[in-house]
Image: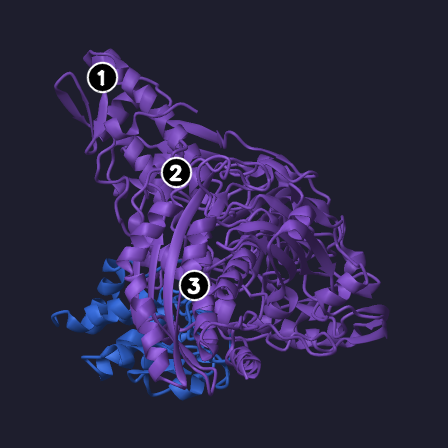
Amino acid sequence: MKLNVNGQALAANVPGDMPLLWVLRDHLNLTGTKYGCGIGQCGACTVHLDGAPVRACLTPAAEAVGKKVLTIEGAADTPRGRAVQAAWEKLNVVQCGYCQSGQIMSAIALIESNPVPTELDIDAAMAGNICRCATYQRIRAAILEAAAAPRG
Amino acid sequence: MQTKPITATAPAGVAHQPLPHESAPLHVSGGATYIDDIAEAAGTLHAALGLSERAHARLVGLDLSAVRAAPGVRDVIVAADIPGENDCGPIVHDDPILADGCVQYLGQPIFAVIADSHAEARRAARLARVDYEDLPATLTPQQAHREQSYVLPPLRLTRGDAQAALQAAPFRLRGEFYVGGQEQFYLEGQISYALPQEGGAMHLWCSTQHPTEMQQVLAHALNLPAHAITVAVRRLGGGFGGKESQSALFAAVAAIAAQRLQKPVKLRLDRDDDMLITGKRHCFHYDYEAAYDSTGRILALRVVMVTRAGFSADLSGPVATRAMCHVDNAYYLSDVDIRAFCGKTNTQSNTAFRGFGGPQGAILIEHVIDSIARSLGRDPLDLRKLNYYGAPPRDVTPYGQRVEDNVIAQITADLEKSSDYEARRAQAVEFNRASPILKKGLAFTPVKFGISFNVAHYNQAGALVHVYTDGSVLVNHGGCEMGQGLHTKVAQVVAAELGLPLARVRATSTDTSKIANTSATAASTGADLNGMAAQQAAARVRARLAEFTAARYGGTPQQVYFADDCVSVGGQRFAFADIVQQAYQARVQLWADGFYATPKLHWDKKALQGHPFYYYAYGAAVSEVLVDTLTGEWKLLRADLLHDAGNSINPAIDLGQVEGGFIQGMGWLTLEELWWNEAGRLMTHSPSTYKIPAVHDCPADFRVRLFPNRNVENTVLRSKAVGEPPLLLAFSVFFALRDAIASLAEQRINPPLDAPATPEAIMRAVAAVRMAAI
């Protein structure tokens, strides 16, 4: 199976129904994407398929063929991705960090599709990414900060 | 321990600054390594567990032939295969690693499958044929209490004569209250990765808050001396108490399998298995009677607390003790009779969870005060202030400790003003008068939380500080980084002691081969204990460098000054790295150990009297909610939190703990409901049915501040522990909900609202208030 991950053409010898999460983690050694629940309810495994956020634990690898997969390891490849990462660092969002790859990927997808999100937009877009440390207050602030950041 | 001249020598740039978490750049780029991210060694096998399908039964037949024959399976392990002790209980030895002869809860591991892949192991684990002979199951703590079935002997804490005071009192209030349990829901589930070493030794990577206990459990299970076991962890994807004792079962299974097969074995739990197997926060049922006078002053309190311990003792004893030591919260209670019963139930063995019984103890007295206020037609805040600890003799806790650092009155005055409590109370009354369906509620609740492990000997810690010849510094200590920013704080302490920028200092994995005999990273004590040990280690190196510098460049060691990455004496200034290099060549020891034991502590665990806490942390919160009394849905409109972290080592990190603790506590008291069916099966065993707070549950208006303070005790940099106490700030949300419901009857009726205050629970309370008001 040939996949385009973070702009790189990669090959993995996996069955088409293997969840993308395990292809990324176990076969492509991209461990930034995390397993949280395996049923698409926690958001820790969020990656982008052609720019849209998906739960990698529920996405069969075959569905990613022919699409651009973006993971947390490639988040810094775009200006908006870098802006989100910078805002996350500046506002000290992270506590344990385990859910944050997913949070950041959802945040980037939100800002890509809605460059000036309101707090309500943020709540709607981020509702599927849970954080047990409850860093939500700072996640909201960091998304607003990243959206307001100059592009470049 | 003597006072260190830290403020005289430390640059302001490191201590007390809101510096980023040491792993922040890794966290945001996917580069932070958790256990499952460690590159697997060649030949790594994967384990899965076969779980009991019954709550209480004899195991009369176990046919594992289909499991063994399944694709990829290398081995199957049952209790009889454990070379040493089949136990992973932290205190009492009543916690089998694998069930032997009988199962005591639905979800209890019976066997382990080891296979080439994780998926093969999990599929094979489903193929067992288990024959059960059912035994009577006890599924609720109330049932256990009726049967007088407990995991530990009942506990009783008394002072004065509560019975006499109750009989003599002008007013009495009798009631019941219930607060549910809570799943830790660490996003990184339980995981252990065992790698056999030469000569029979074992190395274990484990997501745990207690590497030393894992080491001990493995030593007993594998029949090895402790020195043959190394347990390490760089960071946890959340712990919250759930990985204090309960990481042990998985650590043991991985290690037993690795020892048998002489192959690396990883056990990473599926989320549902994790929730079915592991214990949670204890639910509490309270039956109480309080006496009070016409002003609302409490004269006596009698309470019987019954908690769901689960099938084994685990940490239920210490949890119940902490609950009893927090029934007072911030209030002076002259005559008390507090009893606690740890009900033995055929459910998961409940364990530590942020607060460790403290929240469950303290919420009872808040419920009592809230109820008395309504009975007297007073604002609950007035009664809270009236009953606060104060001047002698109203400054001694029921367990005999004097409250010497009380700042609750100052915090209350500050927050009452900054939250505009009085005006908003009037506005809520006004709003409710005009709004028949949507009701506003407001509540102010205080927190006083005791800091230290109740068991005195746990209050010790060690650290190592290595200064390398390039001037870079490595610190290793016994605490685990689980998101609370412990490694950042400890690195700050070391950097401050040596006058270095934070970038010079790196904290490394917690590792039993570096610091021996560590305590759990728990009870909020991580920074207090390990920070002090690391400070002492750094101070030792600094003293040697000062002596060397003075000898070589003149002056006395006391005149040598460490700041801004430099060492100065008598008007001369040298780069820290240069002095280090010179000292190395002069054969000065550039590394040191540090050790800390918290002073002043003593505790009589039979009488439940003594000085169990080094000091107290304080805080208060005001929450305002809007409740839809037709649906039970509600919204937290605004929350104002003011919390005492002493002289905070890192305000950015501490504020994060306050924000997160509050939201997590709100989840416990409002959203999160554990529900077992009649067979004893936990039905809320995944995030599809067990809901923790999400972003939209947080208030749009969230005002969080640290109370400017300085620990009166000589803690590290005069800071205070901050991990657990803010969880109790969420009481304000629960009592704001109760306030909103009570507004249906102009606050004349106490709503029978239990926690979690789910929409269903709110609707029941609404209906009860409406009925009573007719």
Q: Chain of mark 1?
A: B
Q: Which mark is residue B559?
A: 1
Is disc 1 in the same subunit as disc 3? yes
Tally of numbered tags: 3
Asked if badge 3 and badge 2 are on a common chain, one would say yes
Q: Is residue B687 above or below residue B406?
A: below
Q: Are marks 1 and 2 in contact (CB under 8 Å)?
A: no
Q: CA distance from mark 1 to mark 3?
A: 51 Å
Question: What is the C-alpha distance between the residues marked 1 and 2?
Answer: 26 Å
- Give the mark nearest the N terminus, 3 or 2: 2
- Colour mapping: by chain
Q: Which chain is purple?
A: B
Quadrant of the snapshot with the N terminus of chain B: top left
Which chain contains the residue that carries disc 3? B
Residue under label 3, please give it: B732
State the residue at coordinates (73%, 48%). B92
How many neighbours does mark 1 have within 10 angstroms: few (below 14), some (14-19), or many (20 or more)?
some
Going by the numbered disc 2, the residue's amino acid type is Val
Sequence order check, earlier mark of 1 and 2: 2
Residue matched to label 2 = B475
Q: Are discs 1 and 2 both within one chain?
A: yes
Q: Which chain is blue?
A: A
